[in-house]
Image (spheres, rainbow, N blue to C red):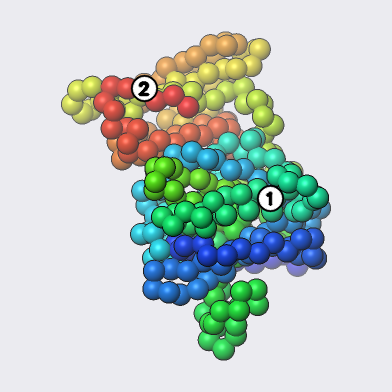
C-alpha cells in the first residue's frame, strides 16, 4: 500500500538559551539531547538524531562556522520560544535542496559515539552546544517538528514540566519508502547558533545517507531511483560569481558567471538559472573546458538587493548547483560577489 504524503504537522523553529545537554551513547535510537529555555522561562528539549534506523546508520553532518545566508535576517527574536513556520521560501524555513544553504558534497558521515575525542557526531555537537552554553549572550535556533506541551508529563531526560520540545532536527525530504510519509519541502531541520560577541553564526546540518538529493518540488518525494549527493569536486558546471547590485539606476545590468570546471565542453542547451521564487532564465550555447561565461540577467530572473538565491538546473530540471547572498553583501554597489 502506498503511503499518503503527510509533511510535518507542526514545523517551525525554537529560539532559546541552551542550559544543559545529554549524550545517549549507543542506545537503540540514540539522540543528542539539548535543554533550552526561552525568555519567558519555558523549558524545551531538542532531540537531535545521531544515528539512523536505516542502514547506513551513520548520519551525514556539516558544520559551517561562518554561516552567511539571508535566512538569518528572517529569524524570530533570540529567546522568543517556539515560532511556527510556513513551509515556503522567504518565510524562515529550511530546505537543504532549494534554500542553497550549503554544498551537500561537503557533508561527511560520522558514527554516533566512539572512544576518543572529536571523532564522532556527539563530540561535534557537544563542541558547539557547550560553546553556546558557556557564552551568556549566545542564542540557539532549532528547526524541526514540535511536540507538547504535555501538561501532566515531565520531560523524560531533563525532568521539567510540562514536557515540551522539538525533534526531526534533520533533512525531512527524499526519504526511503519506510519514512516517505514525512516528506515535504521547506521543512528541513537543523541548528543555528548565534554568537553576538563574535558577530558569528554557526550552522549545523544533518541528513540520513538513505535520503535522496533530488526531490519533487511539491511533495518532497524522491526523484529517480537512488540518492544523488554529489561527491566533492564533482560539479563540472557551477555558479562562481554574480553582480546583483550594479552601479546606476534601475533597470540594472545584473550578471551571473558560470564556470565549466570539467576537462570537456558542456552544452548549455536546456539548462536554466532560477531565483528563489522559481523564476527562470534559459541558457544556450556551450562552454569549453575551464571557461567562464558571464550571463546578463534578463526579464524573468530577479536578483533582489535584499538577499536571494541563484540555482543552476540541468535539462531535466534537477538542481546541479546553488548559491545565496545576503542583504549586506548585495548592499555593496558595483561589487561582484564570488561564491
Q: Which residue is outermost to the left?
A: 249
Question: Residue at horizontal 60%, vertical 79%?
Answer: 159
In three-dimensional space, the C-alpha distance between marks 2 and 1, rounded to whole angstroms, equals 38 Å
* Towards the viewer: 1 or 179: 179
Q: Nearer the viewer, mark 2 or mark 1?
A: 1
- Residue 113 visible in the current orientation: yes
Q: Is residue 205 above or below residue 52?
A: above
Q: Quadrant of residue 79?
A: bottom left
Whole-percent x, y for residue 155 in the image? 61, 78
Whole-percent x, y for residue 103 in the image? 58, 36
Local SS, label 2: loop
* Towards the viewer: 329 or 91: 329
Instruction: Sort mark 1 into few (<14), some (14-19) or many (20+) by Cα contacts within 10 Å.
Output: some
Question: Residue at horizontal 46%, vertical 31%?
Answer: 273
- Residue 286 visible in the current orientation: no
The residue that mark 1 highlights is 123
Q: How many marks?
A: 2
Instruction: Sort mark 2 into few (<14), some (14-19) or many (20+) by Cα contacts within 10 Å.
Output: some
Whole-percent x, y for residue 331 in the image? 28, 32
Quadrant, the N terminus: bottom right
Amino acid at each position: 500500500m502506498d503511503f499518503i504524503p503527510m509533511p510535518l504537522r507542526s514545523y517551525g523553529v525554537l529560539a532559546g538559551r541552551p542550559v544543559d545537554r545529554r549524550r545517549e551513547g549507543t542506545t537503540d535510537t540514540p539522540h543528542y539531547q539539548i535543554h533550552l529555555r526561552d525568555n519567558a522561562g519555558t523549558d524545551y528539549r531538542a532531540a537531535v538524531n545521531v544515528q539512523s534506523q536505516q542502514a547506513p546508520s551513520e548520519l551525514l553532518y556539516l558544520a559551517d562556522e561562518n554561516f552567511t545566508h539571508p535566512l538569518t535576517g528572517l529569524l524570530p527574536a533570540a529567546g522568543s520560544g517556539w515560532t511556527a513556520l510556513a513551509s515556503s521560501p522567504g518565510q524562515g524555513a529550511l530546505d537543504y535542496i532549494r534554500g542553497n544553504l550549503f554544498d551537500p558534497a561537503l557533508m561527511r558521515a560520522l558514527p554516533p559515539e566512539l572512544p576518543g575525542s572529536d571523532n564522532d557526531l556527539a563530540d561535534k555537537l557537544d563542541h558547539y552546544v557547550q560553546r553556546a552554553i558557556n557564552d551568556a549572550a549566545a542564542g540557539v535556533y532549532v528547526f524541526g517538528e514540535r511536540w507538547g506541551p504535555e501538561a501532566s508529563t515531565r520531560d523524560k531526560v531533563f525532568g521539567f514540566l510540562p514536557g515540551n520540545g522539538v525533534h526531526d532536527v534533520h533533512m525531512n525530504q527524499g526519504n526511503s519508502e519506510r519514512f516517505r510519509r514525512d516528506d515535504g519541502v521547506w521543512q528541513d531541520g537543523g541548528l543555528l547558533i548565534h554568537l553576538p560577541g563574535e558577530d558569528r553564526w554557526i550552522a549545523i546540518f544533518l541528513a540520513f545517507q538513505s535520503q535522496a538529493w533530488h526531490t519533487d518540488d511539491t511533495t518532497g518525494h524522491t526523484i529517480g531511483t537512488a540518492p544523488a549527493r554529489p561527491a566533492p569536486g564533482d560539479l563540472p558546471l557551477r555558479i562562481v560569481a554574480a553582480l546583483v547590485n550594479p552601479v546606476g539606476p534601475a533597470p540594472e545590468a545584473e550578471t551571473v558567471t558560470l564556470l565549466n570546471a570539467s576537462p570537456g565542453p558542456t552544452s548549455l542547451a536546456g539548462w536554466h538559472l532560477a531565483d528563489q521564487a522559481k523564476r527562470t532564465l534559459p541558457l544556450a550555447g556551450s562552454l569549453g573546458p575551464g571557461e567562464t561565461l558571464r550571463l546578463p540577467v534578463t526579464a524573468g530572473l530577479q536578483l533582489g538587493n535584499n538577499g536571494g538565491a541563484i540555482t543552476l538546473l540541468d535539462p531535466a530540471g534537477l538542481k546541479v548547483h546553488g548559491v545565496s547572498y545576503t542583504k549586506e553583501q548585495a548592499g555593496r554597489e558595483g561589487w561582484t560577489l564570488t561564491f
